[in-house]
Amino acid sequence: MRRFALRLIPLLALAAARLSAAAPEAFLVLLGDQHSAYERTAQLVARIDRLKAQHPGVPCAILLNGDSLEYGNVVARRTAGAIDFAMFAALAKRAPTILNFGNHEPEFHDVAETIARLRAAGLVVISGNLRDRESGRPFAPASTLLKLGAHEALIVGVTTDRLATYRLAIRPQLDLADPVVWAKENFPRLFRDRDHPRTQSAERSGTVALPIVLSHAGLRADRELLPLVPDGTLFAGAHDHLRFVHRSGNTVYVHSGSWMDYVSIARLRRAEGGALRWDVEQLPLSAGDPVDAPLADLIRQTLSQHLTAGETAVVGRSPRALGPGEAALFAVEAARAAAGADAAMIGATTFGAGLPEGGITRFAFDACVRFDGPLFVAEVDGAWLQRLRARANQGPATPFAARAGENLVVAVPAAIASDRRYRFVTSDWAAKNAKTYFGDDAPTLTELPGLKLKAAVLAALNP
């Protein structure tokens, strides 16, 4: 036994050494598309406190990849995002917090005032291709340098150029460069220019600035951006409400989902050969998780003060709680049934929060089904429907090669005959952007009179 123990000691020492070598040298908390998700806001801050406690002494930072705010949240709108800005300040007190400007950031003020408020809360704001139409100058810097202990990261931000996704009132202020065109012109300079004094100091100390991209341009644009970044880049995408992690060489491409349903943790580790690499873990965030007490109190008080009786009234019931993905599928199936259709498709960004078990208030319902509008129908053949199904309902396990760009939620028959005709229903947004959602062979869509999306979902919640 003693001889066995003596043999075991070197093995344990080797295992401990390897474990120590694999310990993170820094970690980042990544989120995108938060959309004023107040049911998880205080939980997020508490989760970061726990992460810091689990990584004592390890440098950390928080990266927010656009669309932190939500105009459709009536409390956020009435308070100009008071809860959100309290969250920003709480995050900035815990770690350096960088926000890449998305299309939903200027929900309550114009762009310049929004950026000023974000900076006043302690955030660093970046956005490379978002320019002031009047002056032609960027509203915020394209990049920032972040100190992570012995390391330095260069963080570059880009956002979507789809003007229709920005609030109508601020569109005249915007000059939106195509993110791919902008990146081709600016990424080489940003990632390879060594004139920056802090980058030079990093090189003299034997390190190189770690490349990080925050893109709120969507997956379709990101496919063209990925070949432009250095190998080993941590590339965070957003805007499509997708969730997955994809590794290409030493580069890691990650989408963190939406509505704070998940949070992504990127840990910087040193491999046995000495090379640095990012590992990403995605953790669920639940409304039942521990909360930051001061922020939770603020949320309760603010909701109580600003919600009307109509908004706290119960408008439907669910036999069980549905997460954001499940709730979106439920809503699409409700649209299909209400239209008497064989199949239905609605873009995932029409939906937000999940649905609670039991009574569902108007406020909770509107957080789930963000947008309303008439439904549109078409007759399609089975082969077309099969192609649509192959591009839809994509989750974390979907192969990257199968991801076309738009995040589509579909309800279709289990078996589809390629030579049969089917009645198909979709939303008004998809009908207006048919080529984007359906391609060049988009069907001819006709509005269904008297039937809207929210009414269809409410009918399903009140059988």
Image (spheres, rainbow, N blue to C red):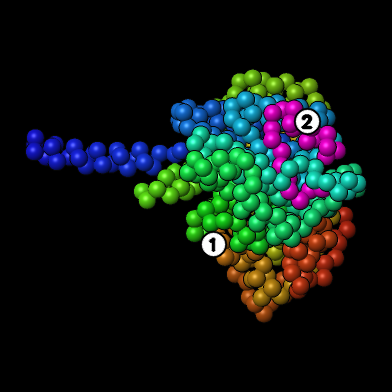
N-terminal label among 2 and 1: 2
Q: In the rendered view of the protein, which quadrant contains the N terminus?
A: top left
- Assess disc 2: are there few (<14), some (14-19) or many (≥20) residues with their C-alpha within 10 Å of its C-alpha: some
Was residue 159 drawn as part of the magenta stretch in this picture? no
- What is the x, y in percent for residue 351? 71, 47
Q: Is residue 318 above or below residue 56?
A: below
Q: Which residue is mark 1?
A: 399
Q: Quadrant of residue 315?
A: top right
Kind of residue at disc 1 = Pro
> Disc 2 vs disc 1: which is toward the camera?
2
Q: Is residue 37 above or below residue 347?
A: above
Which residues lie in the magenta part? 110-131
Q: Is residue 265 visible?
A: no
Was residue 112 drawn as part of the magenta stretch in this picture? yes
Q: Which residue is mark 2?
A: 117
Write the residue at 74% across / 38% down.
69
Q: Nearer the viewer, residue 199 or 377?
A: 199
Q: Nearer the viewer, residue 279 or 293?
A: 279
Q: Is residue 422 above or below residue 157?
A: below
State how many labels appear: 2
The CA distance from mark 2 to mark 1 is 40 Å
Q: Is residue 397 above or below residue 68?
A: below
